[in-house]
Image (tube, rainbow, N blue to C red):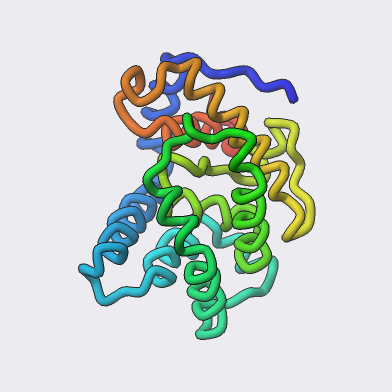
Amino acid sequence: MRHETPTIQEIDKARVLFESNEPLDLFYRAATELVELSIRRATSLSMAEALAVLLQTWNAAFYRFAKRKFDTQHFADIERLLKKHSHRLSLARKRSIETFGDELVPEVKRVFEDMEIVLGPVGAAKCLHLLAPRFFPLWDRAIAQAYGLGLRERGKNGESYCRFMAVVKGECATLGGPGALGRNPLKALDEYNYCKHTRGWM
């Protein structure tokens, strides 16, 4: 896999471009807060409803092309996954990407593949990121392709996602982590990847 780590200057440039051109970032911030409130039981919204704020905006294409609806069954499917993996996800929320290693690959692969059967490989990454924002990185199809990881059918992308996590871990280390970037490195890298690979703004 060949992928060139961006510089901090490129990360900063992407931040400006992203904030100037991508209004959907509002839904990321709203979903992030709602997930936190849901974990603390400080909102009447369920976790699935909190995640839906991002899924219905950032992952709208999945629902359009896969002809899926955010109906009662879909919410129930998401809640079932959250319950099944609640312990793993709770531990992951306390982790950062720096702690990812070979010993975690089987577990991450299992969780990711379960999630993507219901949400697709892009939606799975988005949900996992919201649930553990410093451990699970974001991707979309264009980003995965740029990292040499073309996405396959649902349920078969866990290994590719783990490979993506390993590369992102290395990128975060090269960039100097949160101390050098001043914010979550996974969100910063996603903004760069989105601007460069998804939108072609860089």
Foreground of the two, 186 or 17: 186
Q: Report which quarter residue 22 is drawn in.
A: top left
Instruction: Name the quadrant of the N terminus.
Output: top right
Q: Residue at x 42, y 54 (%)?
A: 131
Foreground of the two, 196 or 129: 129
| Total count of labels | 0
Residue extending furthest bottom?
Answer: 72
Can residue 17 be seen in this snapshot?
Answer: no
Q: x%, y% of residue 8?
A: 43, 16
Q: Residue at x 74, y 32 (%)?
A: 148
Q: Residue at x 46, y 64 (%)?
A: 86
Q: Residue at x 44, y 22 (%)?
A: 11
Q: Is residue 131 above or below residue 51?
A: above
Q: Is residue 202 above or below residue 102?
A: above
Q: Is residue 37 left or right of residue 148?
A: left
Can residue 79 be seen in this snapshot?
Answer: yes
Residue extending furthest front?
Answer: 103
Instruction: Name the quadrant of the C terminus.
Output: top right
Q: x%, y% of residue 122?
A: 61, 52
Q: x%, y% of residue 156?
A: 76, 54
Foreground of the two, 150 or 132: 132
Q: x%, y% of residue 115?
A: 60, 62
Q: Is residue 152 left or right of residue 185?
A: right
